[in-house]
Image: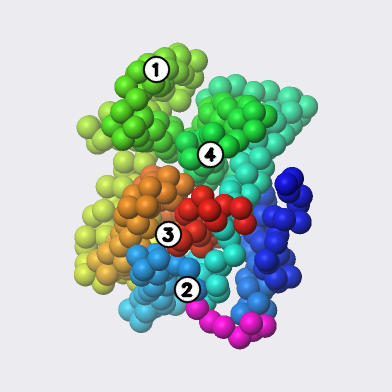
């Protein structure tokens, strides 16, 4: 019997339908404009609160135990930010710092309080399809906009108005979903959907050079290695694995010559790590941030004073960078929150990774890998633009129950 669009929302309450549609809107808006995504997220949270009040039930029974602990740790991490105000001298800056992280504090609380078991695998895929389609549309929009405005396009040059590290996060996550969709549902997909997935993957990979993010290239390489290992080690498809390997090497070699500026940036970064006297700016930042963080053990400088402490180390090193942050969530946590903050951060990222590996959840693994990689190059939690990874984290955690991972449930 042929299904229609109403079957997709079957057995959902009106508030659940509204909440789900807002989640899809959030997935669509996030890659375009973080402020619009933030307003959508606030509407999303308001809908969740109304639904909780309406059904008079608090708690999410569908979340696995590792995920539940990860969310508690995530909430604890942000509450530790508040506690660190006790030893911060600059309280005003500290509150401003926390305010920029507020959406990320609300996320784990809402996930723990709201029953999101209605987000079945099929509906989870629906969010991801909307997310990926939004990125494909944006790619063409950026290309056309650059040509119309006379800016022109060039490989290795960023043409996207969104910060390149955040766009890299979106692209890596979408690529992980496309591979997962192909691997898990290849046999049941319509021919046109298969063509669409292949086309979208090509567009997403093509998007990377026009975002020009070193983080993006590292993330792309990491996903490539994961796919290669999955094919050759897990599935024992040696021939296909070799085809993927040589294809990836060919693309990488071509990119090296087609994008000399990007290649030079990557090579300079690697050489800077080996020889800090000829340091890349990032290496100087990390070096000073690490020394500043170690100096403030065990509890950190506090969220209000972390930047001031880092500025002093910059000054001693001959740099006038009073407002330049660590560009690394791990160093940022060590500097402002000390060892407790760093350990909370590592634990809240490690638990979903282990749970995803145990359940062979490629989307979740890709998400956590992407956050870790982007987090090594940007302080992605220290501004509201960090909201951009709420979308993939929401559906990854909200549908993390093992009972929702079966094909029998995919019909709803």
Image spot of residue 129 (x, y percent): 62, 44
The residue pinned by badge 1 equals 243
Which stretch appears magenta? 53-59
Given the current orientation, which residue lies at the most extreme front position? Answer: 1
Question: How many angstroms separate mark 1 from mark 3 (CA)?
Answer: 33 Å
Where, by quadrant of the figure, is residue 254 drawn?
top left
The residue pinned by badge 3 equals 402
> Reading the chain from its start, which is encountered first: label 3 or label 4?
4
Image spot of residue 394 (x, y percent): 53, 60
Give the secondary structure at mark 1. Answer: helix
> Reading the chain from its start, which is encountered first: label 2 or label 3?
2
Question: Callout 4: few (<14), some (14-19), or many (20+) C-alpha neighbours within 10 Å?
Answer: few
Callout count: 4
Q: Is the Cβ of the residue at disc 4 closer than 8 Å to that at disc 1?
A: no
Question: How many angstroms separate mark 3 from mark 4 (CA)?
Answer: 18 Å
Question: How many angstroms separate mark 4 from mark 1 (CA)?
Answer: 22 Å
Image spot of residue 194 (x, y percent): 60, 30
Residue at the location (78% across, 27% down)? 148
The residue pinned by badge 2 equals 61
Left or right of 271? Residue 148 is right
- Whether residue 403 is visible, yes or no, is yes
Q: Is the Cβ of the residue at disc 2 closer than 8 Å to that at disc 4?
A: no
> Reading the chain from its start, which is encountered first: label 4 or label 1?
4
Mark 2 or mark 4, whichever is nearer to me? 4
Mark 2 or mark 1, whichever is nearer to me? 2
The residue pinned by badge 4 equals 185
Question: Callout 3: few (<14), some (14-19), or many (20+) C-alpha neighbours within 10 Å?
Answer: few
Question: How many angstroms separate mark 2 from mark 3 (CA)?
Answer: 12 Å
């Amino acid at each position: 019997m042929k299904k229609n669009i109403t079957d997709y929302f079957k057995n959902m309450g009106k508030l659940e339908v509204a909440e789900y549609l807002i989640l899809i809107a959030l997935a669509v808006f996030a890659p375009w404009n973080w402020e619009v995504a933030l307003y959508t997220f606030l509407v999303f949270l308001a809908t969740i609160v109304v639904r909780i009040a309406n059904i008079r039930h608090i708690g999410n029974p569908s979340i696995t135990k590792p995920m539940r602990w990860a969310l508690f740790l995530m909430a604890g991490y942000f509450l530790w930010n508040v506690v660190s105000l006790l030893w911060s001298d600059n309280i005003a800056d500290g509150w401003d710092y926390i305010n920029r992280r507020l959406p990320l504090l609300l996320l784990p609380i809402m996930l723990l309080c709201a029953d999101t078991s209605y987000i079945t695998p099929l509906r989870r895929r629906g969010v991801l399809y909307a997310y990926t389609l939004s990125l494909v549309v944006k790619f063409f929009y950026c290309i056309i906009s650059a040509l119309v405005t006379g800016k022109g396009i060039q490989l290795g040059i960023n043409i996207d108005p969104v910060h390149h590290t955040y766009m890299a996060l979106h692209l890596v996550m979408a690529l992980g979903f496309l591979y997962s969709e192909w691997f898990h549902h290849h046999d049941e997909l319509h021919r046109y959907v298969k063509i669409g997935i292949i086309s979208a993957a090509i567009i997403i990979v093509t998007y990377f050079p026009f975002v020009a993010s070193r983080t993006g290239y590292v993330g792309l390489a990491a996903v490539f290695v994961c796919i290669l290992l999955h094919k050759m080690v897990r599935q024992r498809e040696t021939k296909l694995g070799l085809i993927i390997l040589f294809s990836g090497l060919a693309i990488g070699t071509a990119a090296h010559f087609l994008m000399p500026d990007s290649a030079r940036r990557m090579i300079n970064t690697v050489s800077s790590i080996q020889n800090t006297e000829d340091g890349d700016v990032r290496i100087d930042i990390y070096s000073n941030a690490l020394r500043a963080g170690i100096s403030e053990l065990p509890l950190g400088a506090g969220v209000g004073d972390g930047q001031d402490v880092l500025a002093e180390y910059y000054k001693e090193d001959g740099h006038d960078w009073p407002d330049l942050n660590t560009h690394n969530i791990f160093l940022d946590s060590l500097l402002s929150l000390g060892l407790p903050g760093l350990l909370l951060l590592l634990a809240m990222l490690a638990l979903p990774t282990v749970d995803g590996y145990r359940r062979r959840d490629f989307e979740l693994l890709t998400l956590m890998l992407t956050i870790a990689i982007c987090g090594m190059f940007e302080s992605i939690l220290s501004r509201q633009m960090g909201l951009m990874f709420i979308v993939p984290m929401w559906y990854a955690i909200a549908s993390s129950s093992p009972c929702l991972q079966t094909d029998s449930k995919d019909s709803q």
